[in-house]
Amino acid sequence: MLLIFLMALLGAGSCISALTYIFFWYEAANSPHPSHHRTCPGARGLFWCVIVGFLSSVSSQLMAYLSYPFGFARRLWKPSPSAKCTHPPVLLVHGLYHNASAWYLYKWWLKRRGYEKVFSWSYNTIKYDFWQLAEQLRGVVREAADLCGGEPVILMGHSMGGLLVRAAIAAPETAESVSAAVILGTPNQGSKLAALAIGRLGRSISYGGPLIKRLNAMPSPKNMPKLNVYSPLDNMVLPTSSLEVPERGWIQAETAPISHVSMLYHIPTVRLVMEFLDEVVACPEASPAVAQTPSVRRTAHA
């Protein structure tokens, strides 16, 4: 029975990965992004990148499926408050159709580096629309800040969670409770694959759609450290250019060629994020993300 269950999960992950990478391959061949030329030069290079991306997507989706039930254990994702913390609290926001379990690797790394209070918010991706969730997140930010006596939080989101992070910090009263923002694999200009999404929330992030235009018209705090991490082989956000934040003041960090979900489990990507957070915590006045023009970092291709 267990073997049948695992085979079913593997089959589901393989079908989704194959379909999305077929779309990615077509998009990359007809509208190549500069990152494609660097990581997958030529038609043959793109072919092998797609194969690698497909395999990383299947394996990461299997990990996501197997860990999903742990997201319902609320006590694992909502720590108790403390009078004082050595590091600021961290609030993690998952992507579409996922839950708090998306962050188990990041939580482990954060704890290991001294971040005592790691809060992961699970939200309903079917019941609410984007702006309702953004309003809910603003309340969760205040709750997470109370974990360390009102200290501002580090806010981190993956995919749809990244869009919610951007919406939250665009509100001045919420931005006061946020010390830094990190987004990963976020459809900052929407995605063409949103047309295939299940539910109105997923379909609302269509490429260049009304929600995206409204969100991109909302400026984020200029002096807040902000990191945008994206993969040149993201199979869920098309075109690849949609992963870039169309706003000055963000660090645009390109990872190794990995799939959309793999960003949650890719160790070099985790290290990049941790190094950024450590720099912010160690020297917040000289944040590397306050530059008025975006810069680019590359992760170790390992």
Image (cartoon, rainbow, N blue to C red):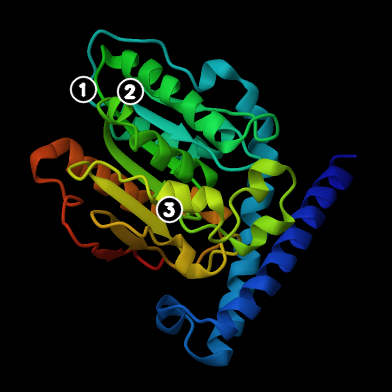
Q: Which residue is mark 2?
A: 116
**Three-letter residue code for mark 1:** Thr
| Nearer the observer, 14 or 94 | 94
x 51%, y 91%: residue: 42
* The label number, if any, that marks residue 267 in the structure image: 3
Estimate the x, y position of residue 129 in percent, counting from the top left: 61, 35
Quadrant occupied by the C terminus: bottom left
Vertical position of residue 185 compared to residue 107: above or below: below
Q: Is residue 268 visible?
A: no
* The label number, if any, that marks residue 38 in the structure image: none
**Three-letter residue code for mark 2:** Glu
Estimate the x, y position of residue 14 in percent, counting from the top left: 75, 61
Q: Which secondary structure, mark 3?
A: helix
Figure quadrant of residue 72: top right
Vertical position of residue 147 compared to residue 158: above or below: above
x 38%, y 20%: residue: 144
Comes first in the chain, label 3 or label 1: 1
Q: Which secondary structure, mark 2?
A: loop
Q: Which secondary structure, mark 1?
A: loop
x 69%, y 40%: residue: 66
Q: Is residue 147 visible?
A: yes
Q: Residue furthest top?
A: 83
Query: How many angstroms separate mark 3 from mark 2 (CA)?
Result: 20 Å
| Nearer the observer, 9 or 133 | 133
**Three-letter residue code for mark 3:** Ile
Estimate the x, y position of residue 296 in percent, counting from the top left: 27, 65
Query: How many angstroms separate mark 3 from mark 1 (CA)?
Result: 24 Å
* The label number, if any, that marks residue 86 in the structure image: 1
Q: Which mark is nearer the camera, 3 or 1?
A: 1
Estimate the x, y position of residue 37 in percent, counting from the top left: 43, 84
* CB under 8 Å between discs 2 and 1: yes
